Amino acid sequence: MTVSSPDALSATPRLPAVDALLRQQHHDARLVGAVVLVRRHGQLLHADATGWADREQQRPMSRGTQFRLASVSKPIVTAAALRLVARGVLSLDTPAHALLPDFRPALADGTRPALTLRHLLSHSAGLGYRFLETDADGPLAMAGVSDGMDACAHSLQENVRRIAQVPLAFAPGHGWHYSLGVDVAGAMLEAATGLPLAEIVRVQVTAPLDMHDTGFHTDTPTRLATPYVSDQPRPRRLREGEVVPVFDGTVGIAYSLARASDPLAFASAGGGMVGTADDVMRLLEALRGEAHRDWLAATHVAEMTRAQVGEQGPPDPPGWGFGLGVAVLRDRIAAATPQADGSWRWGGAYGHSWFVDPACGLSVVALTNTLYEGMHGAFVDRLRDAVYPDCAVAVAP
C-alpha cells in the first residue's frame, strides 16, 4: 500500500513511471517510505512522499520528513570546503598536518607522507572505514575509531587522533578506498577557521541555500523517519546500536539512532547530518548551476565533479571514478547506464541515493528509510531508468 501525505498529494507534476515504480516497491515490501524529487533544467517533474515515516505508529511519509543523511553529508561538507578554498582560507593541496600537527599517519614502512585536503575529500588518502573492515578486531576497531554514525562519547579531535594511529593502506594519491577522510577534512576546516564544523556548514552552505532543515542534529526528533532494515517478508525496524553489514564479509555499521538528536555528538562530516529531500535538492541544483549561481564558482564545481584519481574509484558498478565528495561517471557503457559521462552521484547508508546528469539537466533525489534497498538495492537503478524516458536530451553512446 502507498500512503501519501497531503503535501505529497498536492505536488505536481508526477512522472507515471516513477509513480508505478514506487507503488510496486511498496506492494513488494521493498521500501517502507520514500521521498522522491526529480528536476530537469530547474523545472519540478516529480515530487512525492510515499509510504510510512513510521510504519508501527502509522505516521505517513511527508516532504517535511527529516532523514539521517549518512553519506549524503559528504557533498554538503565538501561544498563548504570548496567555499573556503574559493575564499583563500586554505587550498585543496594544503597538507593536513599544516592544520592538524598531530595528524601524521604512517605507511607500513614507517614513513609519514603528506596527506592533503584533496586526498581526504577524494578518498585517495590511504585511510579506511571501520565498518568496511573484514575483522571485528581490525586496526580501526582496535584503535577505537568511530565511523560517525555510532554512539560515541569522544570528540572529533580525539577521533582524528585515533585515526592517525592506524597505518595507511597505500601512499596518498596512489589508490582509492572509501574512508573517514571527509571526517578528517572536517577537522581541517575547523582548524583553518577556528569555528565548529556545524557553524562552518551553516554559514557556507545551508544558510545561503535556504537549507533550513539540515544540520548535524535535529531539535525535533519527531520529524525523523524511523529506519528499517531490508528483511523477509518485509523490512524490520532498526534497533539502537544494531550492527548491519553493508557488504558481505564486512563488519558493518553500528547505528545509533539517538545520535541524530544529540547536540553533544561530534560533527561527523562524512555521515553525521540530518536533513530533508528538498534541502538535498537545493544543494544539487546550486552545484549544477541552476540556482544560486553566485554561490560557488563554476571552476570549483568542475573540480568537485572531476575524477581525481584517474580510473580508480568505486569498484561496483564499473565505469565510475571519484571527484571530491561525489562519484563521477567516466564510462557510461562500462557502467551500463543511460546517464551521460560526467554525471555525478552518491548515496547514504540509511537508504538514500541521488544523482545529477548535467547533460540532461537532471537532478534526482531519493531519500528512503529502508537500508540498504534505498542505497544500493534494485530500486536505485529502477528509479534511474524510470526517469530517463522523460529526458528530452539525447545522449550519444
Image (cartoon, rainbow, N blue to C red):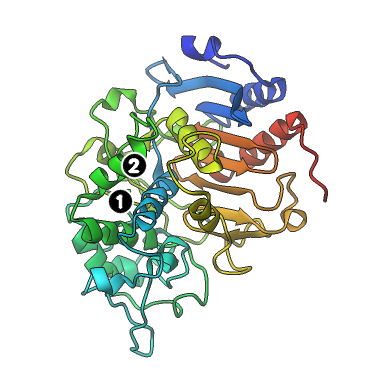
Quarter of the image holding residue 206? Answer: top left
Residue under circle 1? 268
Image quarter where the N terminus lies is: top right
Query: Which mark is drawn over residue 129?
Result: none
Residue under circle 2? 273
Amino acid at pointer 1: Ser
SS for dot 2: loop
Assess disc 1: are there few (<14), some (14-19) or many (≥20) residues with their C-alpha within 10 Å of its C-alpha. Answer: many
Q: Can residue 369 be seen in this view?
A: no
Question: Real-space Cα distance between discs 1 and 2?
Answer: 7 Å
Above or below, 362 against 344 in this view is above
**Contact check, label 1 and label 2, Cβ < 8 Å:** yes
Q: Is 56 on the left or on the right of 158, as rendered?
A: right
Q: Which residue corresponds to the image point at 64% horizontal and 36% vertical from the top-left?
A: 362
Q: Where is residue 352 in the image (x, y as percent from the top left)?
A: 50, 39
**For marks 1 and 2 on the same chain, the one whose residue lies earlier in the sequence:** 1
Above or below, 66 against 231 in this view is above
Q: Which residue corresponds to the image point at 35% horizontal and 70% vertical from the top-left?
A: 94
Q: Which residue corresponds to the image point at 67% horizontal and 41% vertical from the top-left?
A: 381
Assess disc 2: are there few (<14), some (14-19) or many (≥20) residues with their C-alpha within 10 Å of its C-alpha. Answer: many
Q: Is 303 on the left or on the right of 387, as rendered?
A: left
Q: Where is residue 54 in the image (x, y as percent from the top left)?
A: 40, 23
Q: Where is residue 13 in the image (x, y as percent from the top left)?
A: 63, 16
Q: Position of residue 215 (x, y in %)?
A: 30, 37
Quarter of the image holding residue 218? Answer: top left
Q: Can residue 302 be seen in this view?
A: yes
Amino acid at pointer 2: Met
